[in-house]
Amino acid sequence: MYLSQLHLSPTDKKTQRTLHDVYLLHQVLLAAFPREAHQSGGRLLYRLEPSGGTEPNVRLLVQSEMQPQWGRIEVGSQLSITAQHTKVFDPELAPGSLFRFRIRANPTVKREGRRLGVIGEKDQLDWLQRKLAASGCKLLDCTVHDEGHLTGRKSARRSGVRPYVMTFRSSRFEGVLRVESTSDAVAAIGAGLGPGKAFGFGMLSLARL
């Protein structure tokens, strides 16, 4: 896997527009990879990092199975990249290891064939605990940041059909977890957690305590 950190200009109008449309942002990021990568099903995860208030740039983390070519996103396009750094990402996890984590997720449940957003901090924590347990991790401590809703405007593929707006409930989880199963945890990092992975959700980042 590869992990990229992109610094974006916060004053560029096209960049602002792209960052406020999760569907458009996904399409723009795909341009950094050859077309065959799109068709092979390689997972692309990303997360717009929360602003610290003093940072001159917006930070975007991108995790991919193929090495990106950020030069394919031309200057003057929908993203103004002021700096970028890409490295090989091969997580080393051992059972019992403690990590700080961050994940932006779209907590949902399916009821009668419909996907509904999970509301309330307790229910969202329960949702995360189940997802982490299935991913070989145990949740030890967590803070929930309710980020409201993120939207994306998807164009219709067929003529005569109007574009429609996609809406995702966004929550950012930050805390501490313990690795229980190395193979399950590594697989979860590569695949992401929960729905909405193509639109900025599900990227699990770990840092050793």
Image (cartoon, grey):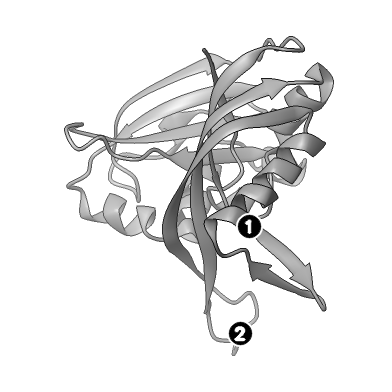
Residue that lies at the very extreme toward the bottom in this rendered image: 160
**Residue shown at 77% from the left, 33% from the top:** 135
Q: Residue at x 46, y 66 (%)?
A: 151
The correct choice, above or below, for 135 with respect to 28 in the image is: above
Q: x and y percent of residue 141 in the render?
A: 56, 32
Q: Earlier in the sequence, mark 1 or mark 2?
A: 1
Res 123 label: 1
Image quadrant where residue 70 sits: top left
Q: Amino acid at mark 2?
A: Ser
Question: For residue 84, what is the image quadrant?
Answer: top left
Badge 1 crowding class, 10 Å Cα cut-off, few under 14, some 14 to 19, many 20 or more, is few
Measuring from the top left, give residue 161's x and y in whole percent: 60, 87
What is the quadrant of residue 193 in the picture?
A: top right
SS for dot 1: helix
User: Which label is found at residue 192?
Assistant: none
| Label 2 environment density (alpha carbons within 10 Å; few <14, some 14–19, many ≥20) | few
Residue 31 in view here: no
Q: Is residue 17 left or right of residue 113?
A: left
Q: Is residue 88 left or right of residue 195?
A: left
Q: Is residue 37 above or below residue 86?
A: below
Q: Position of residue 88 (x, y in %)?
A: 58, 14
Looking at the rendered image, the quarter that the N terminus falls into is top right
Residue type of the residue flagged with mark 1: Asp
Q: Residue at x 62, y 37 (%)?
A: 34
Residue 159 marker? 2
Residue at the spot 59% in from the left edge and 37% down from the top edge: 203
Q: Nearer the viewer, residue 27 or 140?
A: 140
Query: Of residues 173 and 165, which is closer to you in this image?
Result: 173
Report how far apart the C-alphas of labels 1 and 2 lie in the structure. 41 Å
- Total labels drawn: 2
